[in-house]
């Protein structure tokens, strides 16, 4: 169908600045490419950090590359409760006033005064996809995910259009589990507003 | 509005048989009432158990009373993945062929060959509520939950009607976090089928 998208689940992960990569992993360190992600240019790294909150820590959190202008920790709200941190629902990159935590790597530690967010549901697509689906950048849509016993319509899904994107909807592990999403889960854009 | 319900979040918990209570907590042990739950007759206990899966354990899981004909472990799918167990989406009490785990208490251990489930979304209501909302026992409805940035319509919600019930929808922590539900979150029955 013209309005269907692959629904991918993003596990907790960290984006780091060049400065923070050096503090956490050592002077002159560059991220080690492990696996390409679905979005062109984005990749999973060999590097891992521990995310430390006032309540608990979560070890072995994957770092995604490339380096970014601001460090960002994307967790589920289940994780946020475990850590004891605030994680406002935000679009990636919108970290002003978001949650605080400490990151611990093999070479050092970084105190983030902001950067912890729960990612806002979104769909990556090209201008051609957007034209075919009759949506545009920044539109808010609803996506229906049909599953065995947990069919769910996600509202507040942000459309993000860029020539370099690959068509895919991204949700976090809470959202994926809430809908009992499976591998190769498809969703359908059912409404332009909820 | 006539079709609104309070949405309550159920954290992971365990229901136990009389036999398992004695094995886990000692011969002749009776559950210790700590706090009434919203459904009349149901209560949180002082007792805690550790749920052990092949991958990890989760300690300090609350026991709910009273005792039941079959022991049952209700976890989120996030928990199920942590434990490394299967947790089919089921209505409470429907445990045949569901997931396996070990329970550990201060006096002993129980191997459950089945009983681990992820609870199916449901609404408890009285016959009077059902009449007002024009639904009946076992109906499947959709419930819209409006929140800041994570508005969600939950499909596959089972209506359960009983004179002893109090009006409330129950979802698990994954579902609650997926929708960023707050305290005193309300939902609205928007469709009788999804």
Image: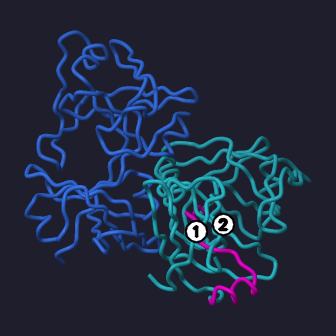
Chain colours: A blue, B cyan
Residue at 86% x, 54% y is B31
Q: Against B75, is A145 above or below?
A: below
Residue linked to disc 2:
B6
In the rendered image, which quarter contains the C terminus of chain A? Answer: bottom left
What residue is disc 1 on?
B187
Residue at (30, 42) in percent of width and height: A92
Name the secondary structure under disc 1: strand
- Single out the residue that lies furthest toward the right: B28
**Same chain, labels 2 and 1:** yes
Callout 2–callout 1 Cβ contact below 8 Å:
yes
Q: Is residue B130 magenta?
A: yes
Within the magenta stretch, is there residue B177?
no
What is the x, y in percent for residue B48?
A: 74, 45
* Picture layout, residue B153 above or below residue B24: below
Quadrant location of residue B170?
bottom right
- In which quadrant is the N terminus of chain A drawn? bottom left
Residue B62: x and y in percent read 72, 49
Seen in the image, is B110 located left or right of residue A39? right
Is A42 positioned to the left or the right of B103 in the image? left
Chain to which mark 2 belongs: B
- Chain for mark 1? B
Q: What is the crowding at mark 1: few (fewer than 14 residues within 10 Å), some, or many (at least 20)?
A: many
**What is the total number of numbered labels drawn onto the structure image?**
2
The vertical placement of B109 against B68, above or below, is: above
Which sits in the foreground, B108 or B46? Answer: B46
Q: Which residues are magenta?
A: B115-134
């Amino acid at each position: 169908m013209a309005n269907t998208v692959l629904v991918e689940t993003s596990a907790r992960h960290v984006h780091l600045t060049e400065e923070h990569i050096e503090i956490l992993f050592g002077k002159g360190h560059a991220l080690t490419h492990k696996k390409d992600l679905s979005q062109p240019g984005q990749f999973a790294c060999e590097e891992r950090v521990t995310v430390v909150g006032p309540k608990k820590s979560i070890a072995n959190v994957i770092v995604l590359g490339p380096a970014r202008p601001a460090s960002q920790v994307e967790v589920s709200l289940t994780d946020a409760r475990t850590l004891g941190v605030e994680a406002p629902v935000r679009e990636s990159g919108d970290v002003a006033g978001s949650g605080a935590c400490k990151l611990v790597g093999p070479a050092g530690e970084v105190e983030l005064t902001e950067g912890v967010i729960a990612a806002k549901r979104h769909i990556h697509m090209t201008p051609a996809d957007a034209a075919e689906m009759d949506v545009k950048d920044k539109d808010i849509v609803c996506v229906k995910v049909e599953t065995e016993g947990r069919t769910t319509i996600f509202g507040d899904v942000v459309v993000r259009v860029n020539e370099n994107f690959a068509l895919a909807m991204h949700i976090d592990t809470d959202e994926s589990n809430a809908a009992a999403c499976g591998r190769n889960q498809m969703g359908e854009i059912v409404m332009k507003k909820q």
